[in-house]
Image (cartoon, rainbow, N blue to C red):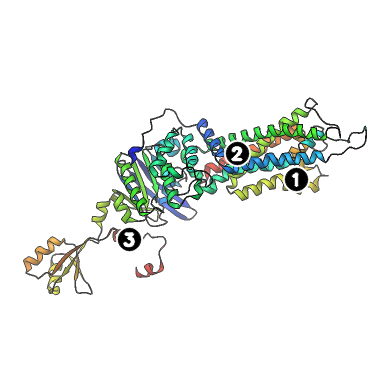
Amino acid sequence: MITAHGLTKRYGSTTAVNDLSFDVRPGVVTGFLGPNGSGKSTTMRMIMGLDNPTSGSALVNGQPYAKLRWPLREVGALLDAKAFNPGRTAYDHLECLALMNSIPLPRIDEVLDVVGLTDVAGQRAGKYSLGMGQRLGIATALLGDPGVLLFDEPINGLDPEGIRWARYLLRDLASEGRTVLVSSHLINEMSLTAERLVVIGRGTLIAEMTVDEFTAQSALNAVRIVTPMSESFVAAMRDAGASTRLETDGSIVATGMSAAEIGELASDRILTVHELTPLRGSLEDAFMELTHDAVEYRTASTASSN
Amino acid sequence: MTSTLIPLTGLPGRYGARQVVRAEFAKLRTLRSTKWTLAITIIGTLMVTILATNSVQHSGPGRGLLNFDPTNQSLSGFALGSLAIGVLGVLAMTGEYSSGTIRSSLAAAPRRPLLLAAKAIVTGFIGLVVGEVMTFACFFIGQAIMAGRVQTAALGDPGVLRALVLTGAYLALLGLLGLGLGVIIRHTAGAIAAFVGVIFLVPALLQPLSAHGNPARFAPEEILSNSVAAVLPQSHQLSPTVGFLFMIGYCVAVLAVAVVLLNRRDA
């Protein structure tokens, strides 16, 4: 269980995280979603006690991180890939950390096996690829068998097979009753991995809900209608309280009514329908819609089209 | 997938100095830079000792060199040794910052003063062991080289044992000074530059003032070569005890600033 309450971080006049409050519950994967620079990493570092909040607090299992009795046995984290000395082997890196929290050394071989680094455990970690570095970071997080896990962009640098592996691993960890918080700026990836979402933009909480709610709430759920009688159709739809938009190809995109309701309306008014297609807005669209006021670094072309 | 992992059993108590000190020892043991730095310390100090004692010449039959301190002469290699041990102290901290390991370390041991204390214990211990072994080795090697050419010192001579023990311990203090600078500055190059500045530059800059109370005698390297490692009393220099206490004071001050900054700064 992770609880953030009024978490705020300012650097001079810049506010990186602003009055952020949310819960991360055990048993499900919670996606921590936001555009680049929205404060995800800063928030995670504050949860870990690495950065001091300007105000507010973050508690892990009801306690500030610094008060944990055996930190690695309660919280595991992958905050940045390559958070290890390049001159040390993967085994030695894990041994140093295991000693800090009296974790039995055979555990090192187990976690190396889980992440698939057994064969290269004796190599100096500086020679690792980004993906191998991520795997070592995940092994580090699992070392103390913790009930709370934080992963900051864990799939960065993983190959497709690795991404799928990480996805299953995160879900397995959650299904074992652990609290799992995974940050990402990719909503599609999160929709496959996470069940709940904490969405932030410019350091402010935008939404805290399930992935299903997030999709359903999206204003982009619309229905495309192809009809030879578009004028009468638009009039009928307007009478029914829906809003419509005429597309360049002559089709109508309606929002405010489901496909079933539109079908019944057409039948009542004896209107010909050639095609009736529910347009389930992509998660990406919903995410962009939700955060488009809160994007820190926007490319010029996107900015001008908004 | 995770089913291959056997759950860890709970543990009473709390992580503390015992765990963190063990881990800090492991950190040094598992890095090549430690072995290199220690090898340079040992080889460099021995080589300078051999050269310095070998260069001592007879001054004629029956006449000893005036004001010649054979103990001090055999310890001349420690200027180089102090540099290497300081680098070891610097790297104990800056190596963590440059690689990002500091975040893993603080995640495992979030009580920062405890982490710094553990690093100080490990750096101090290694500095002490290496320092004591090296001072005695250099003393005996140096006296053997000078034997028959000039008057040499024996372990039982007044002040000799004191000079050897304090010089060895002084190396530990230099390591702690490096550690403190590493915490404060966080970058390897910057911290080593600062350490070299304190050790070699400060006395050189103060040299012109030698006629005005000789302020250079308060510089760490001057304390080492003219006070701590000296058996014969030297004019215008601190006494061995006062010099050693000054160095302890420097270390306490630097480490106090270090612990405040380490606590306050984001990792």
The residue beneath circle 1 is: B203
Q: Looking at the picture, how far across and down is residue A64, in whole percent?
A: 42, 38
Left or right of residue A44: residue B70? right
* Amino acid carrying mark 3 in the image: Met
Crowding at mark 1 (Cα within 10 Å: few <14, some 14-19, many 20+): many
B112 or B129: which is nearer to us? B129
Q: Looking at the picture, how far across and down is residue B220, in whole percent?
A: 71, 40
Depth check, mark 1 against mark 2: the one in front is: 1
A250 or B92: which is nearer to us? B92
**What is the CA distance from the residue labelled 1 to the residue labelled 2?**
24 Å
* Amino acid carrying mark 2 in the image: Ala
Quadrant occupied by the N terminus of chain B = top left
For the point 74% across and 38% down, the residue is: B224
Locate residue B172: give its quadrant: top right
**What is the CA distance from the residue labelled 1 to the residue labelled 3?**
63 Å
Q: Which mark is residue B256?
A: 2
The residue beneath circle 3 is: A288
The subunit letter for the residue under badge 1 reads B
Q: Secondary structure at mark 2?
A: helix
Locate residue A35: give its quadrant: bottom left
* Amino acid carrying mark 1 in the image: Pro
B21 or A35: which is nearer to us? B21
Q: Looking at the picture, how far across and down is residue B131, in whole percent?
A: 68, 34
Left or right of residue A154: residue A88? right
- Same chain under badges 1 and 2? The reply is yes
The subunit letter for the residue under badge 3 reads A
Q: Is residue A290 visible?
A: yes
Q: Looking at the picture, how far across and down is residue B153, in whole percent?
A: 81, 30
Residue contact between numbered discs 1 and 2, judged by CB atoms under 8 Å: no
Locate residue B26: give its quadrant: top right
